[in-house]
Amino acid sequence: LSGRRTQVILWLIPLVNWAAISGAGYLLAHWLAERRLSPWYALVYTGCVGTLMAFSRNLTEPLMVLLAVAGVVAWHRERPGWTAFWLALAMLAKETALVFVGGVAIHALWQRRYSALAWLGASLLPLLLWQVMLYRRFGVLALTAGPGFELIPLRGILGQLTWEPGRLSALLFVALPALVLAICALWRLKNEPG
């Protein structure tokens, strides 16, 4: 998009992120309205502190979420080919989109939509090819090059916590609320009748 002009990149990244956040909000609102739910619930994503932090730090999360939401919406419209397409692009934007693929795969198994699992398997191929190319170029598997997955919530962020405002705000406004909400969700699931 920059046409090889590096100075344009500084403007393009926030514009792409803004468009991605807006697009994901639109898709979520439209999908909620199709299910006769309030489209205002889409503001939970667009106004989320984590979304705003990803935007302000020019991260790839907004683009990944837009593509993953498009994949999940396609899944609910029973279009497994489009689901695979959007989720493949989401994984190329950021590997954490594998969580969405896993969620859709669990849903496919739950509904016994076994033929759709082949499409989800196909969605993994571009990411695998990209990982092979990176390995051949740099000699390291990119998926394993970063910090490992932590089983203890917040353990990764606590080890890097400083008084730097960005790190402290990530803990206070993203990590701790997410932990509290996860505990509330698990408690509700445990105590839900039936």
Image (tube, grey):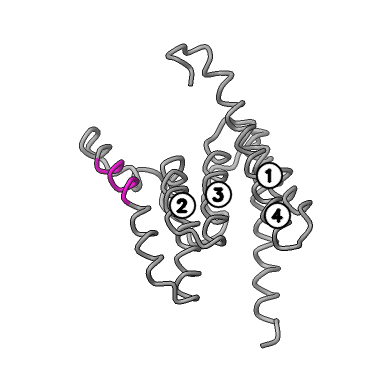
Is tag 3's residue or tag 1's residue first in the polypeptide sequence?
A: 1
Looking at the rendered structure, the secondary structure element under dot 2 is helix
For disc 2, the neighbor class at 10 Å (few under 14, some 14 to 19, many from 20) is some
Is tag 2's residue or tag 3's residue first in the polypeptide sequence?
A: 3
Looking at the rendered structure, the secondary structure element under dot 1 is helix
What's under tag 3, amino acid-wise? Ala
Q: Residue at x 70, y 82 (%)?
A: 191
Q: Quadrant of residue 179?
A: bottom right
Q: Position of residue 17 (x, y in %)?
A: 60, 32
Looking at the rendered structure, the secondary structure element under dot 3 is helix
Could you tell me how far apart the alpha carbons at marks 4 and 1 are, in whole angstroms? 25 Å
CB under 8 Å between callouts 3 and 4?
Answer: no
Could you tell me how far apart the alpha carbons at marks 2 and 1 are, in whole angstroms? 18 Å
Q: Position of residue 144 (x, y in %)?
A: 34, 48
Q: Residue at x 55, y 49 (%)?
A: 70
Eye-nearest disc, 3 or 4:
3
Is tag 4's residue or tag 1's residue first in the polypeptide sequence?
A: 1
Q: Is residue 124 magenta?
A: no
Q: Position of residue 145 (x, y in %)?
A: 34, 43
CB under 8 Å between callouts 2 and 3?
Answer: yes
What's under tag 2, amino acid-wise? Trp
Which residue does the numbered mark 3 point to in the structure image?
70
Is tag 3's residue or tag 4's residue first in the polypeptide sequence?
A: 3
Which residue does the numbered mark 1 point to in the structure image?
26
Which residue does the numbered mark 4 point to in the structure image?
177
What's under tag 1, amino acid-wise? Tyr
Q: Residue at x 56, y 62 (%)?
A: 76
Instruction: Tell me where the magenta segment starts and ends, as one range.
Output: 125-132
- Indicate the quadrant containing the C terminus: top left, top right, bottom left or bottom right: bottom right
Q: Position of residue 152 (x, y in %)?
A: 52, 61
